[in-house]
Image (cartoon, rainbow, N blue to C red):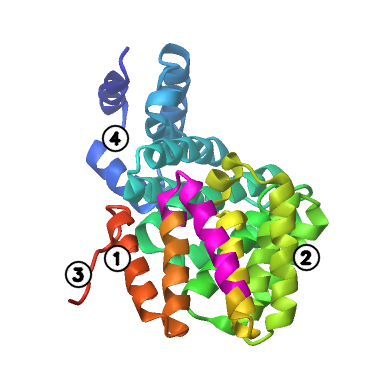
Amino acid sequence: MLPEDTHRVAARQGNYSPIRMREKWDSGLDMGYSPRCVQLHARIVQVLEQRHPELAEEQPEILAHHFTQAGLALRAAQYGLAAGRRAAARSANPEAISHYARALDVLATIPAREERDRLELDLQVELGVPLIATFGHSSLELERAYTRAQTLSEGLPDSPYLFRVTRGLWNGAANAGRSREALERSQRLVIVADAGQNPIQRAIARRAYGTDLVFQGHHQEGLKLLREGSALWDSHGTAAEVIAHGDDLESVGRAYIAWALWFLGYPEQASEVMEQAISAGERLSFPFITTFVFNLEAILDNSSSAFASALSRAEKLWRSAPITFCRTPLPQ
């Protein structure tokens, strides 16, 4: 029996409307079917898993749908998570968001316990990726997902996500210009990272907190933290860590150290460190980080009244910017 045949069998045996089921599934509402219909869907998933095991990888949303109608919420959410991951892997972000949201709706129907909460944590964290791609780091949707993920992480032993979601919440506040909140969140990020004793996380947390301190007037304290973070990164950072975290303290960290030195009245040292940051950025095959460092240098040059250098850097930034960046023509 093929997957689509199960729908025809079900249509002959009971109150079944594919259109109505899809509408209800899309809205995440309970079907309210009779016990007979619940049994029918339970039989459908049993047949599908036995005769079409490839569906678990190729079309997990079908299994998620039938498990939902069978009243098996935990299994439905597990397949919803798989469906979301498949969509996110091919950058189908709205579809991924939809799968994750449906799975969370289904999961909300069962009481809290560790297995259920760990699954919800996976869903909230995975949901963050397409939310960032669709709405940005500062969206209310992302803040809700990561706030819930942070709460779950704090309540579960050995959660692997506490640093990630705490950093995500800091990123959202920093990108939205909520400076006081960003400072509080980056300070919290240092506490989380130090508790975990992961040197890369400790380095990134110090970069975040140090940067916030520098741009809120605490230049000496911020410089100390930025240097601590760069030292940790120099000892443990790799290209794989750059990809995993979207950060590079050899380039970005040093660029912020240059800014701290400039604020403290050491322009020559700032220029020297910024050149080190630029060289490190140019060695990366990570264009977003490279262009970000170019941007930091151009702004610093402009703030130092080095207008010719700032224009030269801006032109190079414009030429090297990834195609996804919005390129505004430079003034003549």
Q: Residue at x 53, y 81 (%)?
A: 178
Label drawn at residue 329: 3
Q: Nearer the viewer, residue 268 or 247?
A: 268
Which residue is denoted by mark 4 in the rendering? 16
Query: Which quarter of the figure is the C terminus placed in?
Result: bottom left
Does residue 113 appear in the picture of this structure? no
Amino acid, disc 1: Glu
Label drawn at residue 315: 1
Question: In the figure, 288 relative to 37: above or below?
Answer: below
Question: In the figure, 295 relative to 221: above or below?
Answer: above
The Cα–Cα distance between marks 3 and 2, rounded to whole angstroms, is 43 Å
The numbered mark, 3 or 1, whose residue comes first in the sequence reads 1
CB under 8 Å between discs 1 and 2: no
Q: Nearer the viewer, residue 21 or 83?
A: 83
Q: In front of the other: label 4 or label 1?
A: 1
Amino acid, disc 3: Pro
Label drawn at residue 191: 2
Q: Nearer the viewer, residue 332 or 291?
A: 332
The numbered mark, 3 or 2, whose residue comes first in the sequence reads 2
The Cα–Cα distance between marks 4 and 1, rounded to whole angstroms, is 63 Å
The Cα–Cα distance between marks 1 and 2, rounded to whole angstroms, is 40 Å
Q: Secondary structure at mark 3?
A: loop
Q: Secondary structure at mark 2?
A: helix
Task: Write down the quadrant of residue 215 in the picture.
Answer: bottom right
Does residue 166 appear in the picture of this structure? yes
Task: Write down the quadrant of residue 52 in the picture.
Answer: top left
Q: In front of the other: label 3 or label 1?
A: 1
Q: Which residues are magenta?
A: 269-289
Q: Position of residue 232 (x, y in %)?
A: 74, 54
